[in-house]
Image (spheres, rainbow, N blue to C red):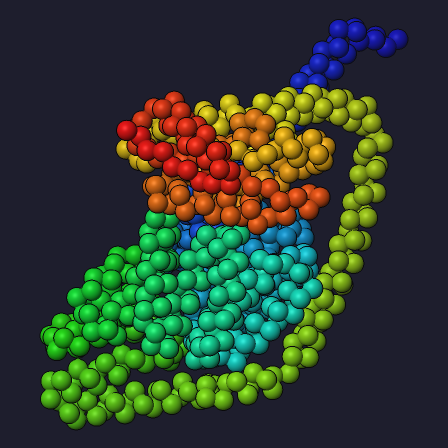
Amino acid sequence: MTRRKPITTWLSAVLLLLSMLTFAVDAAADDAATLVEINSIRQLIKEGDIGHAKLRFQGVERPEDDYASWMAEYYLTEAELMFALNPTEVREIRAVIGLAQGELSLRIGSPLYADVWLLQLRLNATDRELDSVMSQIDQVVELAVSHKRPELAIEALLFAAELTNEYGFNLLGFELLQRASAIESGLGSARMEAELALAYGKFYGSTLILKRSISELNLALDYFKLHGPFRRYIDSHIAIGQSYFLTSDYQQAEAHILLAERLASESDLAAQHRDSAYALARIRLAQGEWLQAREYALKALALSISLTDQFDFFKMRSKIALAQNDLWTAEAALNRAFQHYNQLPQSKQETHSGIEVWQLSAMLAAGKERFQQAWHYAQKYEALEQQAQRKVGTSGIESLLIELDVTQLNSRNRRLLDSNHEYQTKLAVAAERLRMQNIIDLLTVILVVFMIAFFARLVYEKRRLALLANTDALTGLNNRRVGLERTQTWLSQHPDKELSVVLIDIDFFKKVNDQHGHQVGDQVLQQFAQILRDHCRGKDIVARLGGEEFLLALPCDQHNAMQRAEALRASCEQAQFSNGLRVTASFGVVVGKGHPFELLYEKADQALYQAKRERNKVELVSIA
């Protein structure tokens, strides 16, 4: 006769199972939170906020055994961050990309494959021939389209177009832009339209169709100024400044690029800071201001990390020395330029930028009265220049653009969509098999599923309550407590930096509730909160204090604080709210350094009180 186990044994087993399930649910919730943080860091990298992204990435706790559901995202983010910080560390970045690919091999059909391929493409562009890079572009686009990520496909095509234009293959670059336009036409994204306008503006600038270039770049500039990202706004200023430079309108060129240089410096955007400094060196050189040209060139060198950047610097240094008739310095700089030139890929050497070293060599030899050598260098330069010109006849570029057969490009995209359909069919079959297997598993453990659901609900409610404690339920912004605490924390951590505190109050909000109802009033608050989000940067603090009153804490000086508050006021005034309402707001601003938060808040409240006298106004109060 079989002896039955005591009831206490069964109870112990059930309790052990419950504890294990609770642990599993908590771990899954922690994994989800970590994945959200990693995706936020990747967005910061895309927007160019590298310093903030690096700081937040250091806060992500990596599991000791390197096992977690988000390890692929972790390695991909690490590789993207390394590339943004120093793209010349090719071997180290490829090693991390390999780890990401290893994790993705366990996740068949993951959309992250397209991101990995695009990063590989950008990495290859730093040290490989153009043909090697371009052979991968269709694979990246096909992956992105197959995973229904048209924005990523457009991003890859725009990158490839800019690369081919840089190498002098303008018509190939235009074909890539047309393919991107064909994908964007079915997307209807204002952001992608602005990205295309920026890319077309650079293309027309490279082919000296300058009027059209400036027109396209102004469209991009207007969008990025209002909607961001801030990095692209600065890129637009640099590009439009370079087009004005090519028209010899140095005043307009200088105005755009000086603004870009200042904004890039304030925002710690190294790539934009380098590009704007180099552009300013070219302007100063063209104006004969050699000392200032040298200062900007040295600034660009200090921010340079790639071989191409350093090659461009020593070319610029040689030009400046030749303009000053300093032949010794010119020769030393040109020798350094040739050292970098010899390390460039051959396709890079054959660009207009690359062959310029032979023109400088001819000028240097002539300055030293070595005329036979100068003649030899001049002939070599002319031969290489004619070879580069044969890649595409820039004088006839406008007629070639008109004659380009766009239907072939559309056919190419249709082929990609057909491939996507076939791939999706295979995925559907695999998904059906997996679903049937899951049903079988569910039937065997139905009791356990109910228990998991119960404990998952407990954990969810716990986390939801924690979120509600920190977030304003109506607008999704920080609530009053969190907003004030974060502002006070920032002040304590940065006693030597300026902080601008802005209090905002929606004008006549009571009339909105009285005349249109509280539901419309809630919608107005939500739309106003979205306007605040659109104008905020990564380091800003934004919170709803209560009712129609909001707080902004901006780590910037008085000039920038007033500019941004005025931009917010104008955006609110121009926006159309629910029921066609027009709503305005009043702003109280105070700027201080090393002052207690209570004093800043009191002064900002005084400024808001003054602004509310006239409504729809920004008022500044100084700290005595």
Q: Nearer the viewer, residue 121 or 551?
A: 551
Give the left or right position of residue 320, taking residue 544 as reference: left
Indicate the quadrant where residue 414 lies.
Answer: bottom right
Q: Nearer the viewer, residue 66 or 210?
A: 210
Say above or below: 44 vs 89: above
Count of numbered circles on the image: 0
Q: Quadrant of the N terminus?
A: top right
Say above or below: 576 vs 368: above
**Residue 314 in picture, x, y percent from top left:** 24, 69
- Residue at (68% x, 57% y) in the render: 148
Q: Is residue 335 visible?
A: no
Q: Is residue 192 visible?
A: yes
- Residue at (28% x, 70% y) in the render: 283
Indicate the quadrant where residue 367 lies.
Answer: bottom left
- Residue at (60% x, 55% y) in the render: 113
**Residue 466 in picture, x, y percent from top left:** 59, 23
Indicate the quadrant where residue 365 lies.
Answer: bottom left
Say above or below: 39 vs 282: above
Query: Which residue ends up furthest to the front in the rendered image?
Result: 614
Give the left or right position of residue 310, taking residue 173 as reference: left
**Residue 493 in picture, x, y percent from top left:** 34, 29
**Residue 491 in picture, x, y percent from top left:** 36, 29
Q: Nearer the viewer, residue 512 or 458?
A: 512
Q: Nearer the viewer, residue 521 or 306?
A: 521
Q: Quadrant of the C terminus?
A: top left
- Residue at (48% x, 37% y) in the render: 614
